[in-house]
Image (spheres, rainbow, N blue to C red):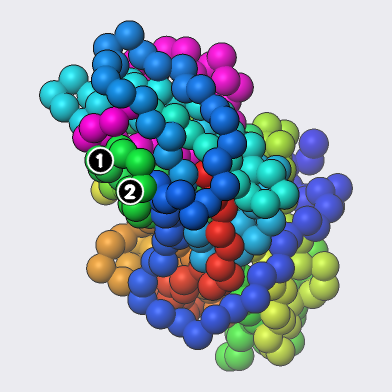
């Protein structure tokens, strides 16, 4: 594939509606309910050898504000229950599927527990066989190459006192974050090429974190990053949904703002230093000006282009919104980031689109 041009990669950018900018990342809510008011379906748990005590049936209701969760019926849900003690060994594990009424049942033994819910899991049931404790599960990673933003992997953790007729809440969040391109234009005023436009333009992500811990909220050091050469082809070939990391504008970008409505998706990146092993994730704009190919790599929420709020880098379950102005010709090297003199941006963090959905276990 020609690494100097993107012409044979089709535009699969996703559109997404925008809300007024805020400075917070909103997460989903999952409710664990132990209530006779809900319908119970018989279910026997796979109980670990360390568990003992009286069994109980738990009813869990999942509610989320994430727009991808509007259709929850038929989703796979893995429910892990661990003993909430020093060893935190597994009590039970069940794979459940939401029916038309979004109601299923989960089983565990009574007592203090740690409940972990994983929605849209990437692993088959047998692949969880190595999970013997909460610490073991905490080391398990999601793989960006298997993600689908329409049904993202989501997880939540809660400390509960398992019993009949109990009620608990879990904060459910996708591992994914969204990079949304709201507008882009060129301002070449005062340049010899003031009337030029950016032709054959595309936008994509580089230095993309491939693996992220499913239940982590903080440490997202990049693992096996993709596109470290600044070009999109490694990720395009390896992703099940390559439109998550690459899109084309479909028309020339000139002085009038273009509203492409492009959504790109990636895993968090908490790297403190931009090194070969732990690079910052970049948003790369590429296009032709007067027949020459230029690149505009931008460190997302870092350095001159961040942070949008207190924490730099890419957080989990956040939506970064970009308004971009290209002010001069860019770099000939797609791996070298440009400065704010070359590209100016306005960026902010929005909450997920607030659409509620309930799922009951």
Q: State if disc 2 and disc 1 touch (CB < 8 Å).
A: yes
Q: Quadrant of the N terminus?
A: top right
Q: Nearer the viewer, residue 185 or 29?
A: 29
The percent position of residue 89, horizontal first and vertical second, equals: 27, 19
Q: Is residue 24 above or below residue 332?
A: below
Q: Nearer the viewer, residue 127 or 116?
A: 116
Q: Residue at x 42, y 39 (%)?
A: 58
Camera-nearest label, 1 or 2: 2
Q: Is residue 341 above or below residue 337?
A: below
Q: Which residue is mark 1?
A: 161
Report the magenta residues as a range. Answer: 109-132
Secondary structure of residue under mark 1:
strand
Q: Nearer the viewer, residue 338 or 139?
A: 139
Q: Residue at x 68, y 37 (%)?
A: 239
- On the question of residue 11 being in view, the answer is yes
- Residue placed furthest toward the top: 49
Q: Is residue 8 above or below residue 331?
A: above
What mark, if any, has residue 334 been given in the picture? none
Task: Categorize mark 2 by other alpha carbons within 10 Å: few (<14), some (14-19), many (20+).
Answer: some
Task: Categorize mark 1 by other alpha carbons within 10 Å: few (<14), some (14-19), many (20+).
Answer: some
Instruction: Judge left or right: residue 274 versus residue 155.
Output: left
The percent position of residue 177, horizontal first and vertical second, equals: 50, 55
Q: Which residue is mark 2?
A: 166
């Amino acid at each position: 594939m020609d690494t100097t041009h993107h012409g044979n990669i089709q535009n699969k950018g996703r559109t997404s509606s925008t809300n007024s900018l805020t400075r917070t990342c909103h997460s989903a809510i999952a409710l664990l309910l132990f209530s006779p008011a809900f319908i119970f379906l018989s279910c026997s748990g796979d109980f670990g050898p360390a568990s003992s005590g009286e069994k109980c049936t738990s009813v869990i209701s999942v509610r989320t504000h994430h727009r991808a969760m509007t259709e929850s019926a038929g989703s796979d849900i893995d429910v892990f229950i661990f003993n909430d003690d020093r060893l935190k060994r597994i009590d039970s594990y069940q794979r459940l599927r939401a029916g038309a009424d979004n109601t299923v049942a989960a089983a565990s033994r009574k007592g203090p527990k740690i409940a972990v819910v994983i929605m849209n899991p990437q692993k088959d049931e047998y692949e969880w066989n190595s999970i013997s404790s909460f610490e073991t599960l905490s080391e398990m990673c999601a793989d960006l190459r298997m993600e689908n933003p329409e049904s993202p992997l989501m997880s939540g953790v809660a400390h509960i006192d398992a019993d009949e007729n109990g009620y608990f809440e879990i904060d459910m969040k996708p591992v994914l974050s969204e990079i949304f391109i709201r507008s882009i234009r060129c301002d070449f005023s005062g340049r010899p090429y003031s009337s030029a436009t950016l032709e054959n333009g595309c936008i994509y992500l580089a230095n993309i974190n491939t693996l992220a811990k499913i239940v982590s909220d903080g440490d997202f050091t990049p693992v096996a990053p993709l596109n470290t050469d600044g070009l999109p082809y490694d990720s395009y070939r390896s992703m099940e949904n390559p439109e998550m990391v690459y899109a084309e504008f479909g028309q020339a970008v000139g002085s009038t703002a273009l509203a492409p409505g492009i959504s790109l998706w990636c895993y968090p990146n908490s790297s403190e230093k931009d090194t070969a092993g732990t690079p910052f994730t970049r948003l790369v704009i590429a296009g032709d000006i007067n027949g020459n190919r230029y690149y505009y790599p931008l460190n997302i929420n870092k350095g001159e282009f961040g942070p949008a709020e207190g924490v730099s880098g890419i957080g989990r379950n956040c939506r970064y919104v970009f308004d971009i102005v290209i002010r001069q010709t860019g770099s000939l090297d797609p791996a070298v980031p440009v400065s704010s003199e070359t590209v100016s941006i306005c960026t902010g963090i929005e909450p997920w689109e607030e659409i509620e959905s309930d799922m009951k276990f």
